[in-house]
Image: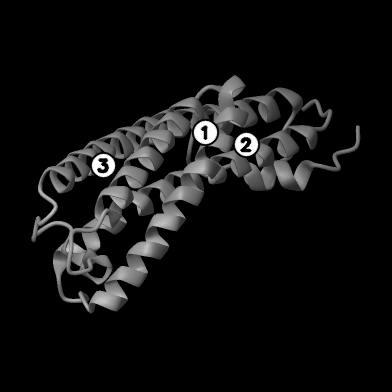
Amino acid sequence: AGRPGGGAMRRARAPGRGAAAAHLREDAPLDSQEQEAVVRELEAELRGMRRFWGALLAAASAGLAMFHLVSAAAVLAEPELSHWPAGLTGLRPARPSAAPFVLDAVAAAALLVSAAGAVLSIAHHRRELARRLLRLSAVAAAAVLAVWGAAVVRGEQWRDRHAYVCAVGPAVCLAVQHAVSSFDGTERGLRELRGLMYEHKKL
């Protein structure tokens, strides 16, 4: 039978990785069973990466959300707090400002939504909901980063290490969204690869 997807199947094989492809020559066409073994191996690797990174990023997001919640509570309890968030002095008028509390609260909410999206992205039937949550989280995180950047510039706090703490949580939200999108793209590529499988039987 014809082998229109043969080149793609050979390119998909990772030399030296996995029992399914270890014994195959790079230039040899794969029969149907070998193709299925290679694709299944790649799919299993992707599932493992999704579980590992999904759990890790969800834990990081949840931990940073707790940090922002504690920070928001501290700012709320002590409006004159002079250390964290020192980078927001550009937003502080002579009287106490609500800006640090609002930014911490929004960052915490975005991180909690990001954690939920990272967990849901592991389950195949929840991925559409995960994508929606992560897009929402990314928009909120980008807004916090924009306000944070303006505050740092206006307050001339470039050398103050505390000025950059506010950016860590929102940046993680964007990283989670990017990571899950990358996994989704890899999964689409594997579906396309499966569609290139061809009928071939070795003699």
Residue at point 67%, 42% (across, down): 189
| Residue 179 shows in this picture | no
- The quadrant where residue 29 appears: top right
Are the two marked residues, 2 and 3, in contact with CB atoms closer than 8 angstroms? Answer: no
> Which amino acid type is marked by label 3?
Leu
The residues bearing labels 2 and 3 have C-alpha atoms spaced at a distance of 29 Å
User: Looking at the rendering, in which quadrant would you find the N terminus?
Assistant: top right
Relative side of 151 to 89, left or right: right
- The quadrant where residue 76 appears: top left
Instruction: Please state which of the two labelled residues, at mark 3 or mark 1, is closer to the viewer.
Output: 3
Which residue carries the number 2 mark? Answer: 187
Which residue carries the number 3 mark? Answer: 64
List x then y, in percent, for residue 109: 37, 38
> Which amino acid type is marked by label 2?
Glu
| Residue 29 shows in this picture | yes
SS at mark 3 in the image: helix
Residue at point 57%, 36% (across, down): 131
List x then y, in percent, for residue 62: 30, 34
Along the viewing direction, whichever of 117 and 35 lies nearer the viewer? 117
